[in-house]
Image (cartoon, rainbow, N blue to C red):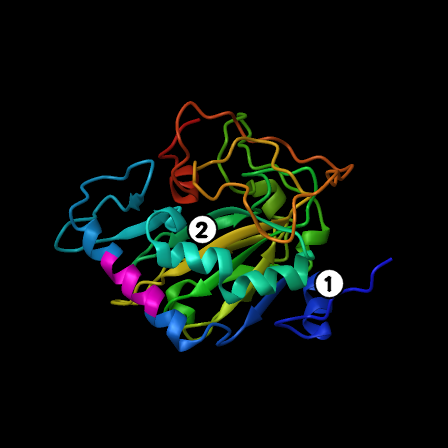
Amino acid sequence: MDAPSPLKTITTADKAFFNDRGYLSLPSFVDADWLERLGAVTARIVEESRDVTESDSDKFDVEGDHTAENPRLRRLMKPQDHDPVYEEFARAGPIVDLAEDLLGPDIKFHHGKLNFKWADGGAEVKWHQDIPFWPHTAYNVLTIGLALADITEEMGPMGVLPGSHQGPVYDHYSDKGDWQGFIGEDDAAGLDLGAADYLKGPAGTVTVHHCRMVHGSKPNTHPTQPRPFLLFAYSAADCLPIMPYNQKSDMNGIVVRGRHPEFPDIDPEPCRLPPLRSGPYRSIFASQQGEEKS
């Protein structure tokens, strides 16, 4: 058996923490040059959104009171398709080395999104796990988030429940059998939400969470500052998606590091499938707030 490759971005203690707790928070992981480039693109995207009057299925998910004078974005969908700087970061930025440290040498890109959580009431994200939205044959899948601006307590930082990735995969359907995109009240009542770790930090902080991690966030109550949080999901190359991709992207399923596998990794524990959609998926905000039907 080949010896494991040396870690490129984290320590062995960091990797052990991720394996045990299911997440990492790495302050100032991304340097100023990348932040400047990504910030400039993001500012342009916000300006472009002023011409948007309602959410669409390809690019912008906006709050109901979004206007040209007061833009209120919830999400830029598949940012990697909308500007080459986002694509370069997803394909070859420092987070790809981080994904390799945690997933192994062969890595596939799954999807990307930029959640804004706008100031003065930007939407909460209810407690949920990622894998029920996009099941794979196995669970060697994670999401890496980048804070494009400082994230403070009042800005609705992502909260994670340490170790919950080793627990059950919860049902994200309602009691009536409708997809709701969050963990139901009965299951949530059994969670120790008081143990949540809310991942704050300066711009350039990177978070990583396992696909089974229970996580969520409160509304952004800062009066003026949105919370732009760039998220890219990766899997070990031998973990194959079971469902169609929620968003069609030029990068769906590409190998960003290493090589295509010979055989799939298949975990014996199943994950309940989400509904087959009659139209494109827009965002978790739309699902959780009942704006989107399957």
Q: Is residue 40 left or right of residue 246?
A: left
Q: Residue at x 62, y 49 (%)?
A: 235
Q: Is residue 242 left or right of residue 92?
A: right
Residue type at mark 2 is Val
Relative image position of residue 139 (x, y in whole percent) = 68, 46
Relative image position of residue 148 (x, y in whole percent) = 38, 67
- Answer few, some or many: residues within 10 Å of disc 2's Cα (few below 14, many 20 plus, some between 14 and 19): many
Decide: is 116 above or below 288.
below
Q: Which mark is residue 125?
A: 2
Q: Secondary structure at mark 2?
A: strand
Q: Nearer the viewer, residue 156 or 27?
A: 27
Q: Nearer the viewer, residue 21 or 256?
A: 256
* Quarter of the image with the N terminus in it: bottom right
In this view of the protein, can residue 199 be seen by the observer?
no
Relative image position of residue 93 (x, y in whole percent) = 49, 63
Residue type at mark 1 is Asp
**Which segment is the magenta one?**
37-44
Circle 1 residue: 20
Q: Is residue 286 left or right of residue 54?
A: right
